[in-house]
Amino acid sequence: MPYVVDFKDVSTAGLETSPVADALAGLRANEARYYSNKYGHTFTVSPATEVPDVVDRVTRILKEERDIVIGSRPLEATTFAVDGLRIDYVFYESGLSINAMYSIADGGKRAVGFKLSDGMDVPEELETRFKFARQKSKLAGTIRGSYFVIKGEY
């Protein structure tokens, strides 16, 4: 069942099995606030088992672009379109959030972003491949992030 993420009253609903559930909930709320403020979009997530096409698309992009396989279990996912972009999100039990931003128009922006919840270690499958920059968030504490540009067609 879809869940509207409230960035004013942060909840761990759907993320309870994560060892960093509070930080992951803050990260999810931070993303919800960003899309609400920038695009007026209501950020809604579903259990990953209810939207396997989103998880499969992100998994395929990671595998085909960089031969990356995420070891953590996906908990929630969403897909939406704003301002000519299709954006897929997957939130993982480890505290990792991955988004794939894909311009609908040819030649537009296309990238995969990684964000690590406060308190989690860099996943083994990412630690030697990416450097993570830090940013502070009132909702999520310290977020570490990185990205790569998508070259293929998805």
Image (spheres, grey):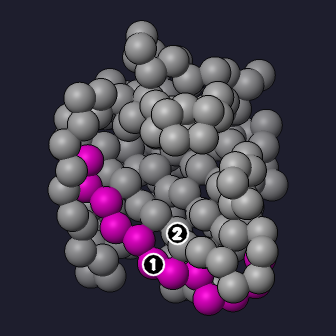
Name which of mark 2 and mark 1 comes first in the sequence: 2
Residue assigned mark 2: 112
Name the residue at 62% across, 89% down: 151
Q: Is 59 left or right of 132, judged from the image as shown?
A: right
**Residue 1 belongs to magenta span:** no
Residue 112 at x, y percent in the picture: 52, 69
Q: Is 131 left or right of 24, judged from the image as shown?
A: left
**In the image, residue 46 above or below residue 56:** above
Quarter occupied by the N terminus:
top right
The answer to which image quadrant residue 144 occupies is bottom left
**In the image, residue 138 above or below residue 68:** above
Amino acid on which disc 2 is placed:
Val
**In the image, residue 152 above or below residue 58:** below
- The Cα–Cα distance between marks 2 and 1, rounded to whole angstroms, is 5 Å
**Residue 150 belongs to magenta span:** yes
Q: Is 107 left or right of 128, judged from the image as shown?
A: right
Amino acid on which disc 1 is placed:
Phe
Res. 20 in view? yes
Secondary element under disc 1, as helix, strand or loop, is strand
Residue assigned mark 1: 148
Q: Are marks 2 and 1 in contact (CB under 8 Å)?
A: yes
Secondary element under disc 2, as helix, strand or loop, is strand
- Front residue of this view, candidates 14 and 8: 8
What is the magenta range?
Answer: 142-154
Residue 47 at x, y percent in the picture: 68, 33
Name the residue at 32% across, 51% down: 116
Crowd class of label 2 (few under 14; some 14 to 19; many from 20; radius 10 Å): many
